[in-house]
Image (cartoon, rainbow, N blue to C red):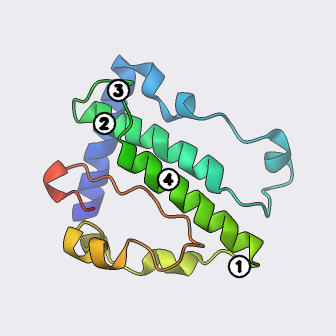
Amino acid sequence: EGRQAEYDEMLKLYKELIAEHPQHSLNQQFPRQPTWVHSTGGCNCCMMGPGIQRQLGLMSSVMAINGLAPGGKVPEEFIGQAIKEVVMHEIGHTLGLRHNFKASTMLSLEEINNPEITRKKGMIGSVMDYAPANFALDPAKQGA
């Protein structure tokens, strides 16, 4: 119930932001998937690259919601972590590893926003998962 209220509040803020700054709409932040993906009902391809693109769009929106300059500089740490994540994930595929989405549930939502836990364990249990960017609506609850 608490998470739903937080989600509803973030959605409300997002809609207010988009009303004032339509360029920050997630639809403007990344292009649509190629038509062949939709016409075939999906694909068995790795979507890590488009996922990172969506996360950059989400980060831009969250930064704007929190009063940071629209179109401002992306933190170097985020870029470095994104590059590292993509490289490790794709090397895993090269080595024959498959996706491991079960690793997404390694931590509870409360644990994800506990920097003491995430600095020791990370946010996911496998590099073969798609690790989401961790943005909390309340900066005081922001994890690492």
Q: CA distance from mark 4 to mark 3?
A: 18 Å
Q: Mark on residue 72? A: 3
Q: Residues within 10 Å of mark 4 (few under 14, many from 20)?
A: some
Q: Are marks 4 and 2 in contact (CB under 8 Å)?
A: no
Estimate the x, y position of residue 12 in percent, counting from the top left: 30, 38
> Disc 1 or 3, which lies upstream in sequence?
3
Q: Evaluate if marks 3 and 2 touch, with contact meaning CB atoms under 8 Å apart.
A: yes
Graded by Cα atoms within 10 Å as few (under 14), some (14 to 19) or many (20 or more), the crowding at tag 3 reads few
Q: Which residue is mark 1?
A: 97
Question: Which of label 3 and label 2 is nearer to you?
Answer: 3
Along the line of sight, which residue is nearer the eye, 50 or 86? 86
Query: Which quarter of the rendering shows the N terminus?
Result: bottom left
Mark 1 residue element: loop
Residue under pointer 2: 63
Q: Amino acid at mark 2?
A: Met
Q: Which image quarter holds the C terminus?
A: bottom left
For the residues marked 1 and 3, what is the alpha-carbon distance in whole angstroms? 37 Å
Which residue does the numbered mark 4 point to in the structure image?
Answer: 82
> Which residue is found at the position 25% from the left and 30% from the top?
68
For the residues labelled 4 and 1, say whether their Cβ atoms are less than 8 Å apart.
no
Label 3 SS: loop
Left or right for 101, reference 134: right
| Depth order, front residue of 91/43 | 91
Disc 2 crowd rating (10 Å Cα; few below 14, some 14-19, many 20+) is some
* Gap in angstroms between the C-alphas marked 1 and 2: 34 Å
Q: Amino acid at mark 1?
A: Leu
